[in-house]
Image (cartoon, rainbow, N blue to C red):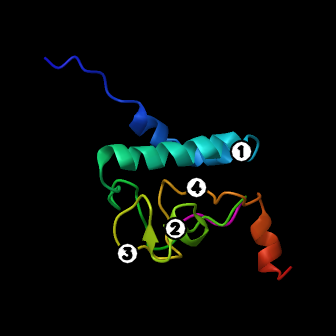
Amino acid sequence: MDTKRPSLGGVRRALTPLRNGLGVVNPETLNGLRRELRDQVASQGRKFSKLEVMYFPFTPIPPGVWLYDCANCEFYRQRTCEIVEGNIFPAGWCGFWVSRVGDKPLSWVAEAVGR
């Protein structure tokens, strides 16, 4: 019988959207999240699959505090991603979306109206 306890890493990663929200009031939450996801990729020796992160080629989440698409994610790099394998659409989204370092909440509004 296997008595090994399951890792809480998966549970913590599943809470990524909630932790993003907490980042509005405590930016260190976002820094920790970015670090954890990069560390996970390094420790497993591969990027996450699109299935593991629930990747969509479009964002199912309307704009809120941030624009929740890959082009506005910390990990996005010109149609690729630091943590997700394969071709990534700028308008895509995954469950590990994290705002870019330095992005202020609601900063997308000023960009949308051309200020």
Q: Which residues are magenta?
A: 60-64
Say above or below: 23 vs 91: above
How far is the residue under mark 1 from the one under mark 2? 19 Å
Q: Is residue 61 magenta?
A: yes
- Mark 4: give few (<14), some (14-19) or many (20+) Cα within 10 Å: many
**Three-letter amino acid code at the position of disc 1:** Pro
Q: Say which of 35 and 23 sits in front.
A: 35
> In this figure, which residue is indicated by the disc labeled 3?
87
1 and 4 marks in contact (CB < 8 Å): no
How far is the residue under mark 1 from the one under mark 3? 29 Å
Q: Which of the two discs, 4 and 2, labels the residue nearer the N terminus?
A: 2
How far is the residue under mark 4 from the one under mark 2? 10 Å
- Mark 2: give few (<14), some (14-19) or many (20+) Cα within 10 Å: many
Q: Which of the two discs, 3 and 2, labels the residue nearer the N terminus?
A: 2
**Three-letter amino acid code at the position of disc 3:** Asn
**Three-letter amino acid code at the position of disc 4:** Val
Label for residue 27? Answer: 1
Q: Is residue 16 visible?
A: no
Q: Point out residue 23 in the picture as x, y percentages from the top left corner.
A: 69, 45
1 and 3 marks in contact (CB < 8 Å): no
> In this figure, which residue is indicated by the disc labeled 2?
76
**Left or right: where 67 falls relative to 12:** right
